[in-house]
Image (cartoon, rainbow, N blue to C red):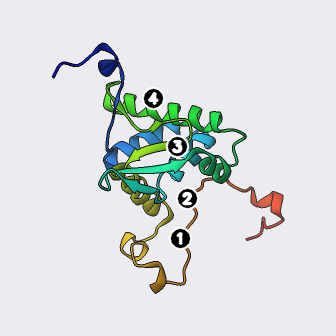
Amino acid sequence: MQTTDSQRETPQLVGCSRDEVAGVLSLIEGVFPAVNVFFELGRKGTSFAQDRLEAYRLSDIQHHTRLQSPAQVVSCLNLIDEALHRVRGSTEASFSGTDGDYCFVATETQQNIRRLWLELVGRDEGAAAAPAEASSEEEPALQVSAPVDARATGNAGI
């Protein structure tokens, strides 16, 4: 089977290792909307393609990250893709794909973003993997916000 020029130009959606997602995060960490979108992809999406892909509605990501439009979500996804290209030293791999309504990531990528999130918030992954019925504790929100200045809240003495 021969590949066409358009197939060669289209990056392949790939699964990212824990080290790769950490590298991507380190490159986008100053762009809070992109960081929020990045961690949204650590949530469980709709699995398909024999559980190899996770799908997320762009409108849901937009709502959870408080962005103004799906186009802003796509811009953040493009920035994340560019960071992956830098981490891998190649443009042949794609972090995510979109079809206008949905965003797709490899399940391996979703799981490694989740693991990274749990490391950052200090949660044990084994406890987080327990069935929801067995725990009354809610999963921590996969959202990053700017640090709060204690002086502005009146809690400077804490």
Instruction: State left or right for residue 151 relative to residue 17.
Output: right
Q: Is residue 118 above or below residue 72?
A: below
Q: CA distance from mark 1 to mark 4?
A: 29 Å
Instruction: State left or right for residue 99 relative to residue 22.
Output: right
Q: Nearer the viewer, mark 1 or mark 3?
A: 3
Q: Secondary structure at mark 4?
A: helix
In percent of width and height, residue 65 lies at 65, 49
Could you classify mark 1 by the number of other residues whose Cα lies within 10 Å: few (under 14), some (14-19), or many (20 or more)? few
Q: CA distance from mark 2 to mark 1?
A: 9 Å
Q: Amino acid at mark 2?
A: Leu
Q: Which numbered marker is on residue 142? A: 2
Q: Secondary structure at mark 2?
A: loop
Which residue is the site of mark 1? 139
In percent of width and height, residue 8 lies at 29, 19
Q: Mark 4 or mark 3, which has the lower sequence index?
A: 4
Q: Amino acid at mark 4?
A: Glu
